[in-house]
């Protein structure tokens, strides 16, 4: 079946540190890939997406590149801020379906 | 443009009762999907509605049902509530333009309804 595996958290970093959250996927077809972020007490917000191989999604300093050969979509940010503290979800969707398949989420805490 | 809205934001029910949750999509969006979020199972897809028809369904029992109205607003119903139904229920809307490859659509989520079953 289709699935997403994220690195387990929690992840704790100091402000201005480099962030990587690993995400790999298994899919029967050619999925689109997403990163969503959830702040405490809120719903999910789309952070970035990529719909084909070698696409790079970027937003608010976060980046992720769709790597078909390694079936990965790792999230990176060069310098995190306290305001980036949240839970990050990697997800995929296959063509013809509106069913998002999510990873289990990675909780990030950034300390001043 | 207003985002996805969900009502109510919080609900407390007792076992055996039923509950109805409401979702209003972004204006112009025709697809509404529902997800359940729990600490143990994470985010799980419940179902998707498009043009008042259920198009996709996840692996949930028949106690979970939904519907969509002609204005794309959607409701989700859970009957005979169980303790394990306590969760954050999230609704998402997307454009789902006709004739397209929907894999490029983006789903936009509402703030969720926190259901507690006692």
Image (cartoon, coloured by chain):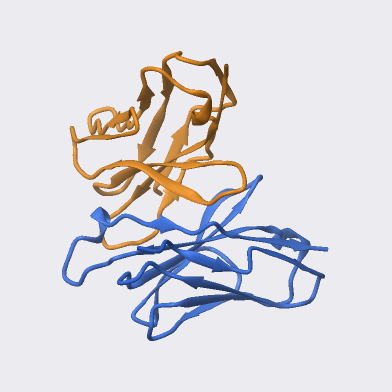
Chain colours: A orange, B blue
Q: Is residue A75 above or below residue A41?
A: above
Residue B26 or residue A52, whichever sits in front: B26
Q: Nearer the viewer, residue A112 or A66?
A: A112
The image quarter containing residue A96 is bottom left
Image quadrant in which you'd find residue B56: bottom left
Relative to A28, say whether B96 is above or below: below
Image location (x, y in percent) of residue B33:
44, 65
Residue drawn at 36 percent across, 40 percent down = A26
Residue A103's spot in the image, x, y percent?
48, 41
B66 horizontally vs B8: left or right:
left
Q: Residue at x 23, y 29 (%)?
A: A69
Percent from the top left, x then y, of residue B16? 79, 75
In the figure, B89 relative to A64: above or below? below
Tell me: residue B84, above or below residue A45.
Answer: below
- Classify the position of the N terminus of chain B by image quarter: bottom left
The residue positioned 31% from the left and 29% from the top of the image is A63
The quadrant the C terminus of chain B occupies is: bottom right
Q: Residue furthest front?
A: B1
Q: Is residue A13 left or right of residue A32?
A: right
Which of the 4 image quadrants contains residue A24?
Answer: top left
């Amino acid at each position: 079946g289709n699935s997403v595996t994220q690195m387990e958290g929690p992840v704790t970093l100091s402000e201005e540190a480099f962030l990587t959250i690993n995400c790999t996927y298994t899919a029967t077809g050619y999925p689109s890939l997403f990163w969503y972020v959830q702040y405490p007490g809120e719903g999910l917000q789309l952070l970035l997406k990529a719909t084909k191989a070698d696409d790079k999604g970027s937003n608010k300093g976060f980046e992720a590149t769709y790597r078909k050969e390694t079936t990965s979509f790792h999230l990176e940010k060069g310098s995190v801020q306290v305001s980036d503290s949240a839970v990050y979800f990697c997800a995929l969707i296959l063509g013809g379906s509106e069913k998002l398949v999510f990873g289990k989420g990675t909780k990030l805490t950034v300390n001043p | 443009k207003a985002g996805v809205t969900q009502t109510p934001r919080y609900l407390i029910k007792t076992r055996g009762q039923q509950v109805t949750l409401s979702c209003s999509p972004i204006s112009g969006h025709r697809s509404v999907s529902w997800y359940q979020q729990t600490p143990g199972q994470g985010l799980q897809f419940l179902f998707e509605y498009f043009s008042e028809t259920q198009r996709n369904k996840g692996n949930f029992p028949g106690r979970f049902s939904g519907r969509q109205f002609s204005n794309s607003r959607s409701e989700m119903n859970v009957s005979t509530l169980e303790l394990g139904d306590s969760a954050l229920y999230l609704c998402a809307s997307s454009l789902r333009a006709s004739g397209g490859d929907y894999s490029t659509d983006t789903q936009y989520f509402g703030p969720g309804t926190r259901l507690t079953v006692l």
